[in-house]
Amino acid sequence: MGAASCCEAHRLRKPCEIKTELSGDWLNQGPLTPSTVSPTPGAAMSPSWDRMSSRVPHDPEHELEWSIVADSIDEDELFKLRELHQVLQDCELHPTCRRKPLHRQAQTLLRFLRARDGDVLKAERMFRDMLEWRHTFDVDGKVHSWRRELERHRTRRARLCKRFAIEEQICNDKHGIPVRLLRLGVADSAGMIREFGQEAILVDSLSKLEWTHEQIRNAMFRCRKLIRGQIQILDVGDYGDVPNWTGRMWNNLRLGPDIYKVFDGNYPETVRKVFIISHPAHIR
């Protein structure tokens, strides 16, 4: 769910009390799929680049991104961001950055800087660890294969995964970023691991995270504004149609931390705001 510092937990009694930043025309939009991408952001030039060029690194392919980020943060944070960018330039030789130049993306670097409260050395270490993890685990390859497996709908685990999915993109917020609903109250973590295996559960979650961050970046270029994560709604309600709510929730708490460590260490600033709904009276 991303770093806790990036989230605001709002405890609400029922879904109708939620006041989110939802757009009015989301119902008219097409389905959300990983193939939906925006035009190359580097193709457009920021109108404020002339005054911005002295404040940010010279990188023609990423000048729009740098100008958006620089306009969105204060000078102290921009100074640290440039420092982080400078110490990571040797990462261009890393296999992960050869595929996608993450070390040159201002918004990506800022997420890691903020995840370490502005400490450049800690942010550098976190970023390098992330690059190595992505390469060693083959994130891009496994996510691509998993998406194809789900699309083809031929394997048993693909059919079960779709049938018992607890996550859904229910609409878009005013920036066009998908709002994510997680129905934890009907989740069965132990059963999912038993049926699919822990790695498949992890890769499915990584696929959703990769998609989410693509949309956050697309929204930044579209709105010319830095946007810190997405809205998530956690529904922990016990509606009686799935038995053993207490046992399943304990399993979620027991098995979740190992996966969340992967999320927090490699996908900071995923969540902007969290709403918790339908929780029982004894845990309010």
Image (cartoon, rainbow, N blue to C red):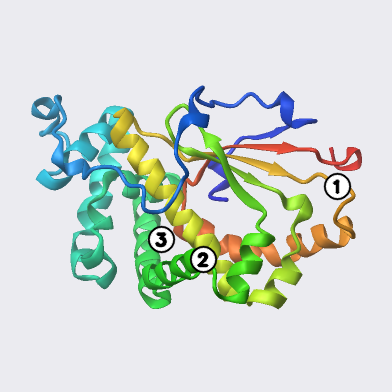
**Residue at which label 1 appears:** 238
Q: Nearer the viewer, mark 2 or mark 3?
A: 2
Dot 1 falls on a residue whose secondary structure is: loop
**The quarter of the displayed image where residue 82 is located:** top left
Which residue in the protein does label 2 denote? 150
Q: Is 201 or 66 nearer to us in this picture? A: 201
Foreground of the two, 283 or 23: 23
Figure check: 40 above or below 165: above
259 on left or right of 191 = left
Q: Which residue is mark 3?
A: 126
- CA gap, disc 2 and disc 1: 29 Å
Residue 148 visible: yes
What residue is at 45 percent from the left and 59 percent from the top? Answer: 266
Residue 194: x, y in percent? 72, 77
97 sits left or right of 238 in the view: left
Tell me which residue sits at (75%, 65%) in the image: 254
Q: Amino acid at mark 3?
A: Met
Distance from Cα at disc 2 to Cα at disc 3: 31 Å
Residue at horizontal 13 percent and vertical 33 percent from the top? 45
Find out whether the residues at labels 2 and 3 contact each other: C-beta distance under 8 Å. Answer: no
SS class, disc 3 = helix
Q: In the displayed structure, would residue 138 be above or below residue 166?
A: below
